[in-house]
Amino acid sequence: MESVTKQIADWRLATGRFGQRKVFDLAAVSVRELNQYLHKELPENSLPTVVVNNPDGAHSIAAGMNALVDIEINGHVGYYVAGMNKHARIVVNGNAGPGAAENMMSGLVRVRGFASTSAGASARGGLLVIEGDASLRCGISLKGADIVVGGSVGSFSAFMAQAGRMVICDGAGDALGDSLYEAVIYVRGEVKSLGADAQFEPTTDTDRAVVAELLAVAGFKHDPSEFRRVASARKLYHWNAEAGQEY
Amino acid sequence: MSERMTISPGQTPSGLSLESSSTFDRSVIDYVQRASATGLYEIRGLGAKRRLPHFDDLVFLGASLSRYPLEGYREKCSTKTLLGTRFATKPIELAIPITIAGMSFGALSANVKEALGRAATEMGTSTTTGDGGMTPEERNSSKTLVYQCLPSRYGFDPDDVRRADAIEIVIGQGAKPGGGGMLLGQKVNPRVAKMRTLPEGVDQRSASRHPDWTGPDDLAIKIRELREITDWEKPIYVKVGATRVFNDVKLAVHSGADVVVVDGMQGGTAATQTVFIEHVGIPTLAALRQAVDALEDLNMRGKVQLIISGGIRSGADVAKAIAMGADAVSIGQGILFSLGCNSHTYVQDGRHVDAVSDYHALGTAPGFCHHCHTGRCPVGVTTQDAKLELRLQPEVGAKRVRNYLKTLNMELTTIARACGKQDVHHLEREDLVALTVEAAAMANIPLAGTSWVPGRV
């Protein structure tokens, strides 16, 4: 929880201070030029809000960010938008292709539309908000980030998720949370099936507080008590490599 | 594995029938009975132990009357090796074509990683991270460090991507093509667990597929993403375990790799099922030829570099691999043996200390140990145990690995000069012949003393 609170403070910093806008029209300039600017040419002080127009499904937009900067993308993006993001606050006013915010370390990525497969894959920190639905394998190999999905998630979501939290405001497909480690899933709607070693667990006040905070940050108005908790039964953690049943 | 016993007719107690079976020999009977007792497959370290067609089955045709040799001790023979010249703006220049293969912190101790970095830096070559992230010990000691991007993405960090000298996308490894990593609980100590975001002591079985892409078309986009993140500076390698090598190498090239790494079935592992190690994948010799064929078919030889690994042991192996068309080799197990793996002793402050009883405690002996998976390495190489890891002192390890690499490089240039080459990369297939029909067929090289290449019409 501490991480989310800290991020909110960071975003205030990012949004409150700077008023300028730097516009990139991807109909006229390449993703390479955009990313080069974002990686190497951002002014040291008074960071602008970077606006990206006409993304037209381009891949790797704002991948590899390492600065506390606001980026607004107007349109649909391809693969790996905000890949490996660190610090930046990135909003996609459209749908996102596979691997949105994959391996994110910190910051905020918000997809206003739908997200394709593997959204937030292996993300280690920060918050990914998908306002629409997310496709297959959302939060696969999650390693500490938080994901809030306004709609539903596809099958194999949170597969092998190791740490972090996923809040799903609607339902989930098959094999939710298969081979979970310590990540926790909160789901409001119907779950088609749970994956191996995933189980429903009773919710506590702490769980409801977590859900309430993540919903508030993400901007969704649901009753936290409507969410069920899915976590690991931890039966796959150890496997009998010592051949203990030998007689 | 039970010891094979030979009973000569004179020793046979009279009246006993001792006809052994070729199908169910003593080792097979032992395997069946172990499986019956435990209900679990055997897991072990290192690579395929079965006999396979290999570089030993090739020899060089040195210079003679029809070819002109170089003076072995006087004339220069370059070993400089460039990797990643296709797209990267900062390709890698190595002093020798022998690199250190990806072996994780987790499988190996931090001391070992530091030793490897120091040795590689002294020799002007590279080390590779492995599955489990980049340690400061390794980054600080290794001048040229290749950072692996694996299916598990344990500890994968954009700052480390930016700190790396090259990125290697691992599709698979020769010991277990189609399988993910494995690190048993006894090696998942607090530091390893934290780096991998795993509970301490968990039996870690990593993913076998990447989480955010599927298939070669996606891989092309993934490579572009890594290029964007690194501002197109760093070479991107793609590593495959040797299976359908001809197609896989072509797909890796189409996906935009700067360098393709092909790991044959003799390649090692820290822990995998024996059935996987011995029965999945193809030998390095066959894999290398197919990889070179693929590059030639695409007219990409020299544009996309090829690194071969899996059972490279000596300077002769390196020379043969280069002559067959590799640009460099990568060594894992040879490096472990160099560090003292399977040695009777370990070195502490200049003194040899006997480790035999510790091998026995593991149920093995020096020369036979493949118990990397237990984390109880008697010589402190493949361990995370606080006491055992002290048995490998970084300066001792660094010196041994440096000496080993130096020896390999001297052997390599000895052969190259004998073949009349001023540059080891001028070694060519025409310099080689095969000693067995199998090797001739796999390597596409004539059987010695003939002009016959099996399968060539």
Image (cartoon, coloured by chain):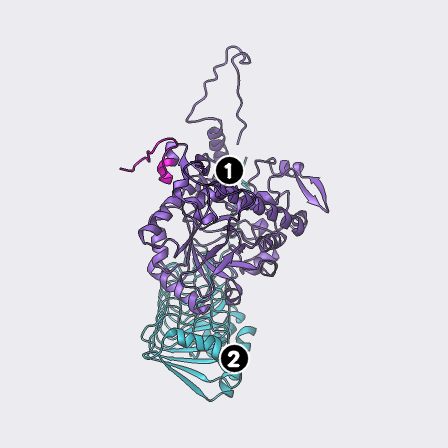
Chain colours: A cyan, B purple
Q: Position of residue B417 (x, y in %)?
A: 49, 43
Which of the numbered marks, if any, corresponds to residue B139?
none
Using the numbered discs, state the Cα–Cα distance from disc 1 to disc 2 in whole angstroms.
Answer: 53 Å
Q: Identity of the amino acid at label 2?
A: Ile
According to the image, label 2 marks what residue?
A: A8
Name of the residue lying farthest toward the bottom? A19
Discs 1 and 2 share one subunit: no
Given residues B203 and A201, the one toward you in this image is B203
Q: Chain of mark 2?
A: A
Instruction: Determine which residue is flagged by label 1.
Output: B38
Callout 1 amino acid:
Thr
Tell me if B156 is positioned left or right of B122 in this view.
Answer: left
Residue A1: tell me if it is visible. no
Q: For numbered disc 1, what is the local secondary structure?
A: helix
Q: Nearer the viewer, residue A176 or B124?
A: B124
Residue B12 to residue A170: above or below:
above
Q: Is residue B291 magenta?
A: no
The residue segment tinted magenta is B440-457
